[in-house]
Amino acid sequence: MNIDDELQALSEQEATLAFTHFDATTAWELGAALKTAAERRGLSIAIEIQLAGQTLFYYAMPGATPDIADWVRRKRNLVNHFHKSSYAIGLRLQQRQTSLEERYGLSVRDYSVHGGAFPLTLTGLGCVGSISISGAPQKEDHQLLVSTLAHFLGLSLPALH
């Protein structure tokens, strides 16, 4: 799969993976589903779910190092800025052969273009928050997040290759 194909698949994921309702209970249930999915894969990740700037779920799994929280923060900041997945933004910059700082003036201290953060979208409203994980290689972080989200929503999505 080339970058254009991956970007198309990511765009479809972003358009498809939307909630009709989201609250603290939904965040808790989704966070628990992400934790369970990571445990099944033997991963030690951190998980954060924010709605309208409020953290509704955060969990650092045993073995997750303290710096993972900063990766989560930086990925979340990117999603909140662009309302796109962090993996998609990273691929778009790679395709354009530029950096986040060069193209948008955003510092890598506060933003990360590595996969693992995804817009929290409400149907009819758009992006209202973010779902972020970190601790595995970026494509694995992204795939874990979207596959769990799709399962949670009762949807099927093509996997990235």
Image: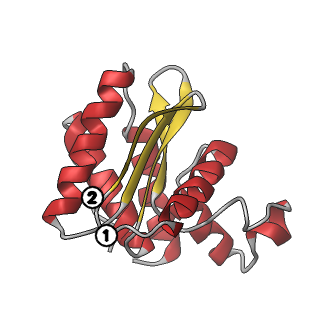
| Visible residue check, residue 114 | yes
Which label lies toward us, 1 or 2?
Answer: 1
Viewer-side residue, 146 vs 47: 47
Looking at the image, which residue sits at the far left?
40
Q: Is residue 124 left or right of residue 82?
A: left
For label 1, the SS is: loop
The amino acid type of the residue labelled 1 equals Gly
* In the depicted structure, whether residue 7 falls above or below residue 19: below
Residue 42 in picture, x, y percent from top left: 19, 70
Viewer-side residue, 38 vs 62: 62
Task: Residue 16: name its quadrant.
Answer: top left
Viewer-side residue, 70 vs 4: 70
Residue position for label 2? 158
| Visible residue check, residue 155 | no
Residue drawn 37% across and 72% down? 136
* In the depicted structure, whether residue 52 falls above or below residue 139: above
Residue 100 in picture, x, y percent from top left: 75, 67
Residue 91 in picture, x, y percent from top left: 57, 70
Q: Is residue 94 left or right of residue 18?
A: right
Residue drawn 53% across and 68% down? 67
Residue 138 in picture, x, y percent from top left: 44, 71
Between the residue at mark 1 and the residue at mark 2, the CA separation in whole angstroms equals: 30 Å
Q: Where the C terminus falls, by quadrant? A: bottom left
Sequence-wise, which precedes: disc 1 or disc 2?
A: 1
Q: Where the N terminus falls, by quadrant? A: bottom left
Residue drawn 35% across and 31% down? 27
The amino acid type of the residue labelled 2 equals Pro
Residue position for label 1? 63
